[in-house]
Structures are given as structure tokens and as C-alpha cells.
Image: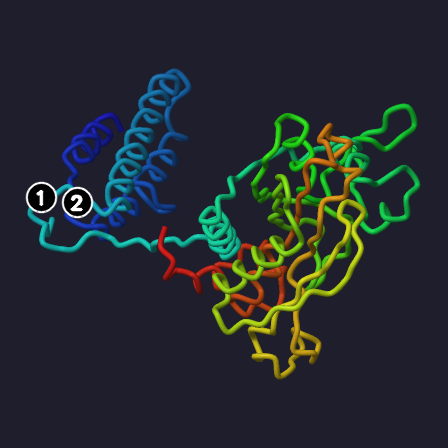
Amino acid sequence: MQEQIDQYTSEINAFAPANAAELETFRIKFLGTKGIIKDLFDQFKNVGPEDKRIYGKVLNQFKQLAETKYAELKETFDSGLSTQASELDLTLPGEGFEVGSRHPLSLTRNEIIDIFKRLGFVVAEGPEIEDDWHNFSALNFPEEHPARDMQDTFFIKKNNGKDDIALRTHTSSVQVRMMENGKPPFRAIMPGRVYRNEAISARAHCFFHQVEGLYIDENVSFADLKQTLYHFVQELYGEGTKVRFRPSYFPFTEPSAEMDISCTICGGSGCNMCKYTGWVEILGCGMVDPNVLENCNIDSKKYTGFAFGMGIERITNLKYVIRDLRLFSENDVRFLKQFQTEII
């Protein structure tokens, strides 16, 4: 048996396959269920008790040698390399890889930011976990105010029996922090992710993205608000896009309005996206309520301002004709590949 093992050891050490087929033959010969190692272990049963300890150690070392040799060679072939330099064709092209693309929400977010930057707006950010003051009270949401029911909130901590720590329901909280920590004039937009406890469907989700804007200075009027948003729509959707404002209500603005644009999918003729009205609401806006200014220690008799907020998903739906906003967060490669023309 020792002579056999010595002979096979020399053969294994000298083995240098030219291709994967020869390596497979080696595996079958030495490591297969009817291979040499299996046969040697069968012979080992007939070794006398006094020699089992010696030959057992030799046989296990031989088996380990064969397994290690096979594993190293297999890794070489799996990596596409060959132990024979003559088989390497250096003229072959390298392996290609797919170029990724930006997410459609990122594309829309960046375009919105670029438009408002050209109007002199800066970008401001804030925490996604907020206290009651910045998320509600400072924005003219008194306790037990019915307006709080407009936004189903994810509360995450109670203090003194009150739900006062929550995932922010809007990026308006960033506006409050800006006004508290600075002095007018302010001209900023606040992009970010927000959370609301809503049932997930084609038109709603428990988290989504917003861009809100704030402009505070002396003698700011509703006309300034309308002209700013009109310019934004023309830049984003094209000069032929129609705009209309409808009276609305928000606790933190007075007067308040919602802005509609002519449906970009049907051109205003009517479809399921615009509910066959020809119009789609894209944002809410209004003049900052004097109470909000006073809550942030800003003189409401000297300064006025406007604010607006829009959902990036809604803007993206209209821009790219995407009818189900769940697609944005499902990471379906088939969906994301449609935007590969937008290279990173």
C-alpha cells in the first residue's frame, strides 16, 4: 500500500491539466465513488491492527493532498484562467458589465432642485425623526386640532403620556428649524423622505418623498408665489403646460391653495390619471400663516412669505407616465432598466 501511495502522490504532484475536462477526469480517478482513494480505504480494512495507526495517517494525508490539488485547479479554471499560458488569447475583449442608472425619483428630485437653484433657492435638510413641536405645534397645529387627523402619523415614543416623537409627516419641519435658527430673508427648498400611516396602493404608500419650499422677506406677496410656481411648471413640463390655482386649507398657510396642471399624459382630454377632468393636482401652497412666523420668533408685521410642498412621486408619475408608485420601491430591475439612458 505504501508503494501505491508513493506512486499516486508523485502523479498528483506532477498533474497539470490543460483544460477543465482533464481536471474532471482527475477528480473521477482519485476522488470519485469508485476512485483510487475509495479503493485504498477498502484495502485499509485488511491492514493488521499494529499497522493501522501508521497507514491511517498516511492515507488521510494522501486524501487531503488529492482534495487540495483538485480544489486549487478548479478555482483556477472557474476564474477563466489556465495553467497553460499557450491557451491564453490576449486578443479577446474583456468581459463587459451593465452600466447602472439613477433612480427615476432621483432624476426628478435633481431636476426640481436645479430649477429652484436657478431662482436663488438653497437646499436645506433636517432629521426624519421629529418632535411634536417641529412636526405639528410650530406649524399652527394646536393639540386636538382636527387638522392633525389629516396626516396619519407613525408615533415612536411617548413622553408624559403624549405622543411627541414621530417619523416626520412632511418636510415642513425643516422650515421651522431654519426659521428658528436664522434671520430673514429665507429662500430655500427642503427635499426629503416622509412617512404616513397609509395603506399601500398604486396611488399611496407609507413613505414617499417631498420637496417643500419657503421664501420669507419683506413685501412678499401671493403674486410672487404664483409667478414662482408658474415658472417652475413651465421649466419642468414645458411651456405649453396650463396651470390653475384652487382655494384650499392648510393650518400653516393663509390663504392656501392647491395648484393643478393640465394632464401631461392625455394632454387635457381626460384619462384615468386625471380622473377624466384634464387636470392633475401637483402641490399645495400658500402664504405663511403669521402664527407660524411668531412661533419662530419672526416679526409677522415686518415679514411675509410663501411656502409650497409637492410629492416627488406624483411629479415623476406625470413626467415619465408611471401609473403605479409602488414600482419606485420594489427594486424591479426590469422597471429600473428603462432609465438606463440616464447614465450615472
Q: Residue 297 at x, y = what percent?
A: 73, 28
Q: What amino acid does circle 2 point to?
A: Ser
Residue at x 74% of width, y 36% of height: 300
Depicted 77 relative to depicted 8: above or below: below
Circles 1 and 2: CB distance less than 8 Å? yes
Q: Where residue 328 sits: x, y (%)?
A: 57, 57
Quadrant location of the N terminus in the rendered image = top left
Relative placement, left or right, of 290 versus 100 is right
Q: Which residue is mark 1?
A: 85
Crowd rating for badge 1 (residues with CA inside 10 Å; few <14, some 14–19, many 20+) = few
Image spot of residue 48 (x, y percent): 38, 22
Q: Which residue corresponds to the image point at 49% horizontal and 62% vertical from the top-left?
A: 236
Could you say whether the residue bearing mark 1 is in a helix, strand or loop?
helix
Closest to the observer, 72 or 79: 79
Mark seen at residue 82: 2
Q: Nearer the viewer, residue 97 or 275?
A: 275
At 78% from the left and 51% from the top, the residue drawn is: 250
In the image, residue 261 above or below residue 29: below
Q: Which residue ends up furthest to the left in the rendered image?
A: 86
Provide the secondary structure element on which disc 2 rests: loop
Rendered image quadrant of residue 284: bottom right
* Above or below for 108 versus 139: below
Tell me the amino acid under the disc marked 1.
Ala
Q: How many marks?
A: 2
Is 312 located above or below residue 17 in the figure? below
Q: Position of residue 50 (x, y in %)?
A: 39, 15
10 Å crowding of disc 2: few (<14), some (14-19), many (20+)? some
Q: Say which quarter of the image contains residue 84.
A: top left
Way the structure is coloured: rainbow
Compute the Cα span from label 1 to label 2: 7 Å
